[in-house]
Amino acid sequence: MKKNIYNKGFAIINALVFCIVLIILGAAIVYITQIGYFSISAEARYQIAEKNANKGLLKAISEIYNGTRICNGTENISFSTGGAQIRLVPDENDQNCFIWIKGNFKNSNVFKIAVISPVNSYWGAAVFRNLDSLKIKKKADIISCNETCKTPALITGNNATSNSYFTTEYCSDEDSCSEGNSNIRALVDEPYKINPELLESPSYLTNTVFKNAKNRNDIFNILSQKYGISFSNGTPTGITGQNIWNGTSINTCTAEDTTITCTYTNGTDITINYNPITGNFTLGSEEYEAIDLGNASLTINSFNGGVGTKIAAGTVEFTGKSAVSNLTLVAREKINIYNYKGATTSITNSNFFAKDYDIFNCHLDYEGGILYSSGSGYLKLRCRSNIGTSDNPTLIIADNQLDIDGKCWTDIYGLVYITEANSGLGLDLDTAGHFEIHGAIISNSLSNSLSMKCHTTIEFRPDILRKLSSSLGFIKPPICNFSQKYQLITTKMRIY
């Protein structure tokens, strides 16, 4: 009897254990079912979120290649479309555009990063925000025939064909050129390209040329920081630094090699010596890193800048035999270089900032550095004169009126850039001899005219522009790919 009682007790325990096991199995089945439901639901949400991300990516690529969105310059562009958030981030030189996309649906997010090569570049042989008139005739041409860097030869914000006559050819079509006709030639499908967005804002071309710049004020800040130049609405007013000798009541000065002799208004003279090894000026027992001569006139026969230095004056005149190197020069009024016949005027690795220029020169060799003009004047190159070389190009910046022409085998190697402050750029390249610009000319002015004939050429040279970018540091190298074919690299990450 007692044995049966024990058996019944064991049966109850077994039943309880079995019930617990059933409960655990049931709970596991419910949990597994729930996990499966959540997994299927999350996968469905993920699929929708990825579709939204893909739609956003295609939308971003379409807007970049159609010019609706600009992926260059200093600003990251963010926008939303449908279920996607998009951010466009250019690299330092605008060679690639990173597209960040977040596709979302409910609590699920899909992140994608794509890298493409943008085509919304404005590099070409000649680029004008607005071109009022264009005349090309008698063996003159605008060329972009570089196999490794394909860009249009001419780019404008408006349709210049409305008041101009010219032909567009491909670089393989040499017959028309050899017959004496003049044209615009390029390797790409559009030798002449119209980008209406250029008319909207000067920032497009500013961003194309300068790093970290959206307008001319940003350009002044770049030049001020790099070269120690002070500006007032674009006009160079002096030099900056902590150890500058400021001369007052000075009438005239003359520079010869490493010696500067000045005459005060009362007739007394002083001598300032320069050490090209240390880069310091010595006056008495004191040393200075730079000198500011106020509004005195300065005549430079020669100057050996050595490691480099800065001088500011009123009007600066170069004699025909001048040889100058490694000098940053500010002329508050004007720089005169007049040497129609005679010895070569040689200026190497120097940076000139002036309100006005009067340059009418035979045998001028200006190699490297910068020519900056804020006012008016002319740059007339004659008799085998050169600004820049293929190995050491020059940047010319015109913030206002600056007339440029050349005759008798003259060349400019580098970049000619005209700011939006220029009220009217007139390039009259109707020369009696060969005059060529190798590199590019880019004008942000809303009023431009270009007339070319008689063996004048504007040639897009990306190799020269890259050397200019490397030597100056604040100029962007050109973007070359203008085809509508793009390379796309993507990565993705999903969060349930």
Image (cartoon, rainbow, N blue to C red):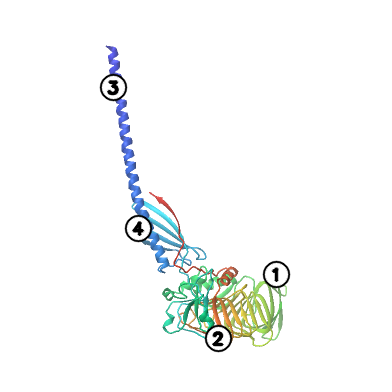
Task: Give the quadrant of residue 387.
Answer: bottom right
Residue 343 position, x and y percent, is 69, 84
Residue 404 position, x and y percent, is 55, 83
Q: Are marks 2 and 3 in contact (CB under 8 Å)?
A: no
The residue located at (40%, 68%) in the rendering is 68
Residue 454 is labelled as: 2
Give the residue number, with chain letter if any, for mark 4.
83
Q: Are marks 2 and 1 in contact (CB under 8 Å)?
A: no
Q: CA distance from mark 2 to mark 1?
A: 48 Å
Q: Earlier in the sequence, mark 4 or mark 3?
A: 3
Q: What amino acid is found at the position of numbered circle 2 in the picture?
A: Cys
The residue located at (36%, 51%) in the rendering is 46
Q: Earlier in the sequence, mark 1 or mark 4?
A: 4
**Badge nearest the viewer, 1 or 3:** 3
Residue 278 is labelled as: 1
**Badge nearest the viewer, 2 or 1:** 2
Pick whichever, 296 or 322, lies toward us: 322
Q: Are marks 4 and 2 in contact (CB under 8 Å)?
A: no
20 left or right, relative to 469: left
Q: What amino acid is found at the position of numbered circle 3 in the picture?
A: Ile
Q: What amino acid is found at the position of numbered circle 1 in the picture?
A: Thr
Give the residue number, with chain letter if any, for mark 3.
12
Q: Earlier in the sequence, mark 4 or mark 2?
A: 4
Q: Earlier in the sequence, mark 1 or mark 3?
A: 3
Q: CA distance from mark 2 to mark 3?
A: 115 Å
Q: Are marks 4 and 3 in contact (CB under 8 Å)?
A: no
Q: What amino acid is found at the position of numbered circle 4 in the picture?
A: Gly
Q: Residues within 10 Å of mark 2 (few under 14, many from 20)?
A: many
**Badge nearest the viewer, 1 or 4:** 4
